[in-house]
């Protein structure tokens, strides 16, 4: 069973359907915005510099 499905079921049983939707939407939005907030994500698209060693 996917973890998200189990979590959504638990949240909706405990808090109700609309609060569970709101919480899951907020979590998805936060995860989608991570590349804007953390510089390490932006470096993933850069090509490696010739002669540079990977650390």
Image (cartoon, rainbow, N blue to C red):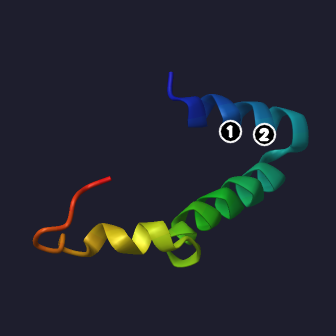
Q: In the depicted view, which residue is nearer to us: 52 or 12?
A: 52
Tag of residue 12: 2
Q: Residue furthest left?
A: 50
- Real-space Cα separation, disc 1 to disc 2, in angstroms: 6 Å
Look at the numbered disc 2 and give the secondary structure of its residue.
helix
Q: Position of residue 21 (x, y in %)?
A: 71, 55
Question: Residue at coordinates 88% horizontally, 34% vertically from top-left?
Answer: 14
Question: Residue at coordinates 25% horizontally, 55% vertically from top-left?
Answer: 54
Question: Residue at coordinates 57% horizontally, 61% vertically from top-left?
Answer: 31
The residue pinned by badge 1 equals 8
Q: Position of residue 24 (x, y in %)?
A: 68, 53
Number of on-image labels: 2
Crowdedness near tag 2: few (<14), some (14–19) or many (≥20) residues, C-alpha within 10 Å: some
Q: Position of residue 46 (x, y in %)?
A: 25, 75
- In the image, is 23 to the left or to the right of 16? left
Q: Relative to residue 40, is residue 15 depicted above or below?
A: above
Tag of residue 32: none
Figure quadrant of residue 47:
bottom left
The reply to whether discs 1 and 2 touch (Cβ–Cβ < 8 Å) is: yes
Figure quadrant of residue 34:
bottom right
Q: Position of residue 1 (x, y in %)?
A: 50, 21
Crowdedness near tag 1: few (<14), some (14–19) or many (≥20) residues, C-alpha within 10 Å: some
- In the image, is 43 to the left or to the right of 16? left
Look at the numbered disc 1 and give the secondary structure of its residue.
helix
- In the image, is 8 to the left or to the right of 42? right
Q: Relative to residue 36, is residue 6 depicted above or below?
A: above
Q: Relative to residue 15, is residue 13 depicted above or below?
A: above
- In the image, is 1 to the left or to the right of 21? left
Q: Residue furthest right?
A: 15
Q: In the depicted view, which residue is nearer to us: 49 or 27?
A: 49
Q: Residue furthest top?
A: 1
């Amino acid at each position: 069973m996917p973890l998200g499905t189990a979590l959504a079921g638990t949240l909706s049983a405990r808090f109700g359907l609309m609060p569970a939707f709101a919480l899951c939407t907020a979590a998805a939005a936060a995860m989608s915005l991570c590349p804007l907030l953390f510089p390490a994500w932006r470096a993933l698209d850069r090509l490696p510099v010739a002669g540079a060693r990977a650390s």
